[in-house]
Image: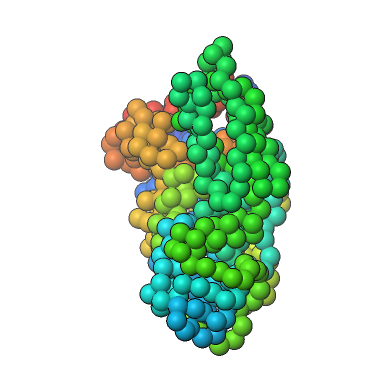
Amino acid sequence: MIRKLIKLALSGVVLANSTYGINLTIPNSLQNNMSVMAIDTKTNKVVYQHLPNTPRLIASNMKLITTAVGLEQLHPDFKWHTKLFYKGTINNGVLDGDLYILGGGDPTLDDRALTEIFSNLQKLGIKKISGNLVIDNTIFNSIPTYSMLKVENYDIDTVFPDGLILDANKTIFNIHIKANTPTIDNNLYGYNINNNLRVDPREHSCSDLSHQVSFKESTVTFSGKISQACNNQKLEFNMIDTKSYTKMALSRTLNNLSIELKGNIVYQNIPDKAILIYDYSSQSLEDAMVYMNHYSVNIIAETIFLSLGAFTTDNKHTYKNSQDIYYSFMKKLNMLNPNFRIENGAGLSRTESVTALGMVNLLKYENDSQYAAIFEKTLPQSGLEGSLKNHFTKFGHRAKFKTGTLNDTHAYSGYFLSRHGTKYIVTAIANNINTNNPSQMTKFNGFVTTLLDKLDTKNK
């Protein structure tokens, strides 16, 4: 049964100021750079709006659209599968042939999962593989485009989806300082760490360390001065290309399980009649979406986007197939505008622009859908978790918003439950602001807080 879409048209709707008497002063710097809309979910009445039809970049608020279309097309119980095969014969602990791993695009696959998968070789008594370990990562035959404004050194936002990706391709370093001596823990295997860091007692804050790291061939070098404040600092980088990282992770797992690989790790297609050893399934899409939205994990959003084309179409062109599904969904919700072009579904884009009215349409649609409880569960709660842990704490846990931030963009979209039990849909989007400027962020967050205050005390 096709769900009825409730469209909110501006024509014929009484403006909030005259309907409920909400009057807000918008800071001058935000007058032309901000779009806001709030509606009562029961009456569908607009209770506040400012430039609701202006297309804006919405940063990670795009993940809400990805969440909605993913739930509808893939369904909450969808799982990614990673499969292990072999071809050959097994005698006296030796696989005389090749081992194959077929990636299903799982963005949450990690060392624990790899250990579970390859421990099945031990159950078959395999201690040695005479041939190659073959990786088939062809489930995604094309990948999204990206038009990010600024990319940092080794930025993890530049990790893109892949048919087989481990640990989200993150190279992780943990800095520890004891007796003015820095040490570096890491998750690499077979790489050299050259630690030339020195503690400077005159420094009292820990600055961005990404510019004090270099990578060449198989050696990572840390150099320069750091502060004592960098003790226990965790660094996450996209330092090694995906294929090299995946090969490293596979080699480490085989080594930890004492399984000898005589051949090489190579990328090829799995041949016909390969024998299945183990089928590993990921956590559910629902659980992945909760983590994605609570902590704004781009690689999960991008993978969900590509999975639309890979698993619900003929997958002749993964990226284009995914785009078509996305456009169809947004058209149904009256969310498309001339400035919009889908790139990756994560918000890492200069073309994924949506109006405040479009976001309200989306949130209203989901609020009335069969997936309402799941969709709302994916949203961070104020003062409680994820990206909203330290925001809007005065309202307890009654604000459930997805946050979004680029260098020049900040946004909140979600639901707000007033003290009187009225549920509102709220979206606030600011463009052309410096999100690294505390003063500008204070003005925007202050405005949103004031709007929530007004909604909280509004008694019908």
Q: Residue at x 57, y 37 (%)?
A: 405
Left or right of 396? Residue 316 is right
Give the x, y percent position of residue 456: 35, 32
**Residue positioned 56% across, 20% down in the render:** 199
Q: Is residue 191 above or below residue 166?
A: above
Using the rendered image of the protein, determine whether residue 101 is visible from the camera's viewpoint: yes
The quadrant of the picture occupied by the C terminus is: top left
Image: 427 above or below 180: below
Q: In the image, 149: left or right of 2? A: right
Q: Nearer the viewer, residue 122 or 360?
A: 122
Q: Which residue does the image show at 46% across and 64% down from the upper left?
A: 258
Q: Residue at x 67, y 61 (%)?
A: 143
Query: Residue furthest toward the top?
Result: 202
Q: Where is 234 relative to 338, above or below?
A: above
Residue 332: percent from the left, percent from the top?
A: 56, 62
Q: Is residue 54 visible?
A: no
Give coordinates of residue 358: x percent, y percent. 56, 49
Along the viewing direction, whichever of 116 and 4 lies nearer the viewer = 116
Q: Which residue appears farthest toward the front when viewing the image?
A: 92
Query: Where, by quadrant of the figure, is residue 317 drawn?
Result: bottom right
In front: 306, or 193? Answer: 193
Identify the residue at the far left of this view: 420
Q: Which corner quadrant of the image does residue 305 belong to?
A: bottom right
Q: Is residue 2 above or below residue 352?
A: below
Instruction: Give the percent coordinates (x, y) of residue 211.
Output: 67, 31
